[in-house]
Amino acid sequence: TGYTTLDPGFVNTASTSSAITYIDGEHGILRYRGYPIEQLAGKSTFIEVSYLLIYGELPTATQLESFTDRIRRHTLLHEDLKRFFDGFPRNAHPMPVLSSAVNALSAYYQDSLDPADPEQVELSTIRLLAKLPTIAAYAYKKSVGQPFLYPDNSLNLVENFLRMTFGFPAEPYEIDPEIAKALDMLLILHADHEQNCSTSTVRLVGSSDANLFTSISGGINALWGPLHGGANQAVLEMLDEIKASGSNAGDFVRKVKNKEDGVKLMGFGHRVYRNYDPRAAIVKQTAHTILDKLGGDDELLDIAMALEEAALTDDYFVERKLYPNVDFYTGLIYRAMGFPTRMFTVLFAMGRLPGWIAHWREMHEDPATKIGRPRQIYTGYTERDYKDVTSR
Ligand code: CMC
């Protein structure tokens, strides 16, 4: 066929050039637009990091104020779109609810669909950043059968999300600044990670000139898988199972290395990191602080730490350079904050949104962009003759 290069999973093939995020997997380094993740997590805010990823520079005070203000004006959902949530069964997982509602934005906001019009792209960018927390909170409210709350725009993005998620219409909701700060920091850690599965999906969908909303919806679906963003839910389920079965970390690690029933140590391993995921190091620290403060399940944290220790000293994991990734400790924090396990990947999606948008926009601004259209190595029949149904 003339096409001989086969690279399953794009292990060694760059699909694009990009100036957004730098990862050095050997040394465990992650930088957004050149800024080390440790500095951003310690000093910045999610809204500022969103600006940085999308526009390439940290905002000035005036730029930040105007960006924040524009987002604040778009937090409401169209009233008809609110009714969309009623059609889902109460026990639906919030991820398909989230991706469907985001896709539905293309039906409700038709004045911001043209990828070739910078003003429309800007409007859809702001709409997504503003509305995703509202949609995420409604997906949660739907799952617990509680009333939706309108956004309170005197609050910042994370505070507003916490109130819409955990608050009630007739009651004041007291925001714990430490929880809001920790959640903001976790969103920063998830904000971008170059050409991962969901971001590559957003780029691939967007490469056909599909609109931003629908491209992001595709990314949310890709994120849901347990090998990607769904791992944070899978980790907590694994820890719960180990706790319930009364087995210990060593037993579980042995089961994993013997590949019994295809069991993996969820929250471990990464395509790019061959070293400690720098995000996991920050999350582990935060897990201790938050669990101390909120009285989370210390037993689960103990199991997680014992698993980490058993894995990091085991040949199987050492030889394969498998270390904890960002998902290993996040679930413990989310649970301590009061989120049910099924909401964990939704929180990941909220964090990853600015990265997806930044990549979609970078792709559209790049004159080298072509529609994504991988080739294949054909392994089927060469040619055969059609047989009538009676003679097959
Ligand atoms: N537990 C046990 N063995 C593992 C694990 C694990 N978590 N991860 C990789 N391996 C083994 C794998 O079986 C293979 O062994 P062998 O050579 O004997 O066949 C070897 O390590 C190389 O792994 P791979 O599957 O070829 O590596 P990959 O780059 O294709 O996959 C991964 C990367 C993240 C999908 C994988 O490590 C994994 O499934 N981890 C568990 C799920 C997880 O935590 N995902 C979150 C990733 S980070 C955040 C995000 O993207 O959402």
Image (spheres, grey):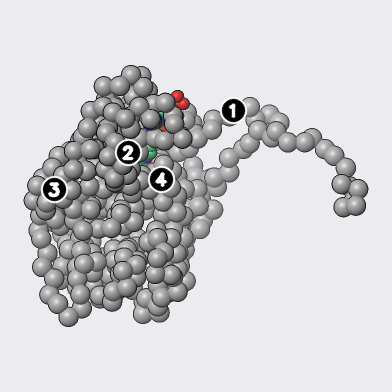
CA distance separating discs 1 and 2: 31 Å
Q: Secondary structure at mark 2?
A: loop
Badge 3 is on which residue? 291
- Ligand 1 shows up in the quarter that is top left
Q: Earlier in the sequence, mark 1 or mark 2?
A: 1
Asked if the beta carbon under badge 1 is closer than 8 A to the nearest atom of ligand 1, the reply is no
Query: In this rendering, would 25 be left or right of 287?
Result: right
On the image, the x and y values in percent for residue 347 come to 29, 55
Query: In this rendering, would 266 be left or right of 165?
Result: right
CA distance separating discs 3 and 2: 19 Å
Mark 1 and mark 4 in contact? Answer it, CB < 8 Å: no
Badge 4 is on which residue? 226
Residue type, mark 2 in image = Gly
Residue type, mark 3 in image = Leu
CA distance separating discs 1 and 4: 28 Å
Q: Earlier in the sequence, mark 2 or mark 4?
A: 4
Mark 4 and mark 3 in contact? Answer it, CB < 8 Å: no
Which numbered tag is attached to residue 34?
none
Above or below, comparing residue 20 to residue 62 in the picture: above
Residue at 26% in and 27% down: 310
Residue type, mark 1 in image = Thr
Asked if the beta carbon under badge 2 is closer than 8 A to the nearest atom of ligand 1, the reply is yes
Badge 1 is on which residue? 5
Which numbered tag is attached to residue 267?
2
Displayed quadrant of residue 28: top left
CA distance separating discs 4 and 3: 25 Å
Query: In this rendering, would 274 be left or right of 184?
Result: right
CA distance separating discs 2 and 4: 10 Å
Q: Nearer the viewer, residue 35 or 273?
A: 273
